[in-house]
Amino acid sequence: MTQEVTLAFTGASGAGYGWRLLENLLAQQVKVHLLISSAARVVFATEYDLKLPGGPEACRDFILEKTGASKELLAVYGKDDWFSPCASGSAAPKQMVICPCSTGTAAAIAHGMSDNLIERAADVVLKERGQLIVVPRETPLSTIHLENLLTLSKAGAVVMPAAPGFYHQPQSVDDLIDFMVARILDHLGLKQQLVSRWGYGDPQ
C-alpha cells in the first residue's frame, strides 16, 4: 500500500525545508496531499525564488514539472476545500507534517481552530490519534509560543524545531536543510540518504 502524507507549507521562514521534504517524499513514491497557505507563497517567492501558482491544479502541474514526479503521487488542495480527504477523519492520511510551521498556525491548532484546511487537517490527525509533526522556525520564542507548542506536544504532536545539528560538518545551507529533512523522514518511518547518522560514516 502506498504511504500517504499530508504536507502543509505555512508562512514561517524556512521554505527550503518544506520544498526539500516534498522532493524526498515524492522521490520515495509517497503520495503527498499538499496544502499551501497564502503567506507560504510569499515566503517561497522571497526566500526560494519559487512562485507557486495560486490555483491547486496549476500549482500541482508546476510542482510535477519541477520534480519530475508521477502525477498520481501529488494532490494539491485549496485552503477552503472542505471536501478534500484531509478534512475528514474517515479519509485523511494518518501522517501530517507542517513544514515550516508558523507560530500563528501552531496557535490555531493548539486551540482547536479550523478556519482553513491546514488547521482542519491538523485537527483531524490529532483527534484520530495519527502522527502530526510541526516544524516551527521562529526565534526568540515568547512564552505564548512555548505554551502553544507545549499544548501541541501534550496533544500528541511531535514538535521538531528547525534547528539543524552541526556534527555532520555541513558545508552549505543545503546540508543544514538536509539535516532537518532527514530527521523528519526518520519520524515518518522513511529511509533517508541525506546525512550520516551519529557514529556512522555514511548515511544510513
Image (cartoon, rainbow, N blue to C red):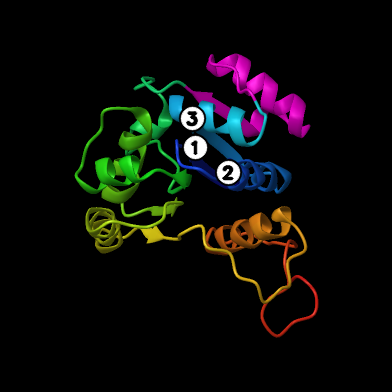
Residue at image point 28% right, 54% down: 145
- x%, y% of residue 90? 34, 37
- x%, y% of residue 49? 67, 29
C-beta proximity under 8 Å, tags 2 and 1: yes
**Residue 88 is one of the magenta-drawn residues:** no
Disc 1 residue type (three-letter): Phe
Residue at image mark 1: 9
**Residue 63 is one of the magenta-drawn residues:** yes
Disc 3 residue type (three-letter): Ile
> How far apart are the two marked residues, 2 and 1, measured between alpha carbons?
6 Å
Q: Which residues are magenta?
A: 51-77
> How far apart are the two marked residues, 2 and 3, measured between alpha carbons?
10 Å
Disc 2 residue type (three-letter): Gly
Q: Residue furthest front?
A: 140
Q: Residues within 10 Å of mark 1 (few under 14, many from 20)?
A: many
Task: Please indicate, yes or no, whether residue 37 appears anywhere in the rendered image.
Answer: no
Q: Residue furthest left?
A: 111
Residue at image mark 2: 18
Residue at image point 25% right, 54% down: 148
Q: Earlier in the sequence, mark 3 or mark 1?
A: 1
- Asked if residue 192 is positioned above or below residue 15 in the image, the reply reads below
- x%, y% of residue 57? 59, 15
- Asked if residue 35 is positioned above or below residue 189 in the image, the reply reads above
Question: Which mark identifies residue 36?
Answer: 3
Position of the C terminus, as image quadrant, is bottom right
Q: Residues within 10 Å of mark 3 (few under 14, many from 20)?
A: many
